Image: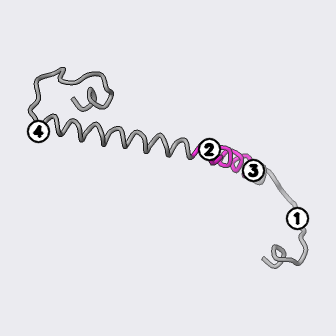
Amino acid sequence: MTVITLSTVGYDEVEETSNIGRIFTICLIFLGVGFFLYITGAIVQFMVEGRIGAVLGRRKLERKIDQLKNHYIICGYGRIGRT
């Protein structure tokens, strides 16, 4: 019944429910829809913020760094140079 309810396929398809069962079903619908919206929002936020591109770009950069051999890093004596 939970899958039927949350997927909005139908209501009361298996057997007749009591008033308490209907209240439970209404709460279940609100919680299920709220959870679905939360997960959807998290996925959209992940894509909009460009994290997918950042993750993929970071992997590409790390592969290039791993391929480097026998090189030197030359920098001045500024904020980064001191570090």
Q: Is the residue under label 1 in contact with that under label 3 (CB below 8 Å)?
A: no
Badge 4: few (under 14), some or many (20 or more) residues near its Cα, within 10 Å? few
Can you tell which quarter of the image residue 56 is in?
Answer: top right
Earlier in the chain: of badge 1 and badge 2, it is: 2
**C-alpha gap between disc 4 and disc 2:** 42 Å
Report how many numbered discs are placed on residues in the image. 4
Instruction: Judge by depth and name the residue closer to the eye, 73 or 69.
Output: 73
Going from the N terminus, do you reach mark 4 or mark 2 first?
4
- Residue situated in front as seen by the camera: 33 or 60: 33
Q: CA distance from mark 3 to mark 1?
A: 17 Å
Local secondary structure at mark 3? helix
* Mark 1 lies on residue: 72
Based on the picture, tell me whether residue 12 belongs to the magenta stretch: no
- Mark 2 element type: helix
Residue drawn at the location 71% of the way across and 47% of the way down: 57
Query: What is the CA distance from the residue labelled 2 to the residue labelled 3?
Result: 21 Å
Q: In the rendering, at what x and y percent does residue 2 appear?
A: 24, 32
Span colored in magenta? 46-62
Q: CA distance from mark 4 to mark 1?
A: 72 Å
Disc 4 on helix, strand or loop?
Answer: helix
User: Residue 30: x, y in percent?
Assistant: 30, 40
Mark in the foreground, 3 or 1: 3
For label 2, the residue is 48
The answer to whether mark 4 and mark 2 are in CB contact below 8 A is no
Q: Nearer the viewer, residue 23 or 65?
A: 23
Secondary structure state at the residue bearing disc 1: loop
